[in-house]
Image (cartoon, rainbow, N blue to C red):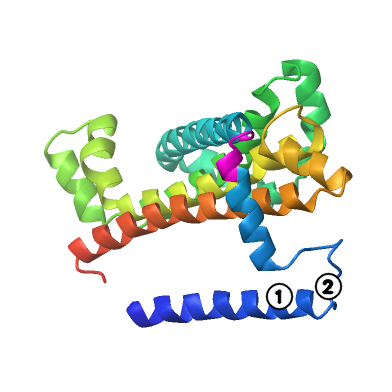
Amino acid sequence: MRRVRLYQVGVIAGLLLLLEALCLAGVIDKITMPPPHRIAVDLVKLLLAGKLYPEIGKSLANVLLAFGLAYSTGIVTGTVLHGYRTARETLDPLFATYYAIPVFAFYPLFIVIFGLGDGPQVLIGFLLGVVAVIVTMLNGLDRVPRVLRKTASICRMGPFETAVHVTLPFCAPYLLTAAKLALAYAFIGVIGSEFIMARSGMGYEIGYAYTNFDNATMYPLIVLILLLSIVMNGVLTHWEKLLLARRGQR
């Protein structure tokens, strides 16, 4: 794994060096994009100034709320749906084509219903993430050995006890995979919604900076969002590896 990590760092470093060279050589215009070292400096200045901390906190709060709702709802729905084959087969075509639906197109409708507050942004993050959790949950439950279910039945466990003590613990790696997907979609939904029509948040600040050609704000915020998502995803991935190692699968 250390070698893979080195390869990953090498690829990222190589891309950054290439981008730096293209910017310094004038192939990429400075108005279009500053060189990476300039973006890093601007990011440090932005964080030290602290002016955008309320916007950053607001966006992160909405992302975590959308993530929590999508994750919990997806796990419960997937667990319940797995026990009803007819309902699952009915909904499978919807799950297969769900992400072809442009959820952002409904943002004006959500504003009419929920107003210009945080509701529409959280809702879009939730809608993007919940189906990914459901599908991952169903995939994990399909792999639970029948012997475990039979053991639970012999022990006279009800559906709730079987889920809590047998099937969900077995599906723990899938639960972590679902968490990574829900987190990624929550970031996409919330930040994207803020960019389109919100009045605050990191997405709004990126959109405002883009309109005013303020690269010193726009690119550092984009990098900050990437770093936050990478760190959160990295924590979940680390837990997943520890769990798989404990089970002897890695």
Residue 110 in the image: above or below residue 4: above
Residue 84 vertical placement versus 200 (above, below): below
- Give residue 166's position: percent from left, percent from top: 22, 44
Q: Residue at x 67, y 59 (%)?
A: 39
Residue 51 sits inside the magenta stretch: yes
- Please tell me the numbered disc located at residue 19: 1
Which quadrant would residue 28 be assigned to in this image? bottom right
- Location of the N terminus (image quadrant): bottom left
Amino acid type shown at disc 1: Leu
The structure residue drawn at horizontal position 78% and vertical position 22%, both measured from the top left corner, is: 111
- Determine contact: label 2, label 1, CB under 8 Å: yes
Up-down relation of residue 171 to residue 56 (above or below): below
Q: Say which element carries label 2.
A: loop
The stretch in magenta equals: 47-52
The residue type indicated by label 2 comes to: Ile
| Left or right, 51 with reference to 179 | right
Q: Is residue 58 visible?
A: yes
Magenta residue check for 174: no
Question: In the rendered structure, which disc, 2 or 1, sits on the residue that comes first in sequence?
Answer: 1
Instruction: Pick the quarter of the image with the C terminus.
Output: bottom left
Q: Residues within 10 Å of mark 2 (few under 14, many from 20)?
A: some
User: Mark 1 falls on what kind of element?
Assistant: helix
Residue on which disc 2 sits: 28
For this view, does 230 lie left or right of residue 123? Answer: left
Q: Residue 225 at x, y = what percent?
A: 60, 49
Q: Position of residue 105 (x, y in %)?
A: 82, 38
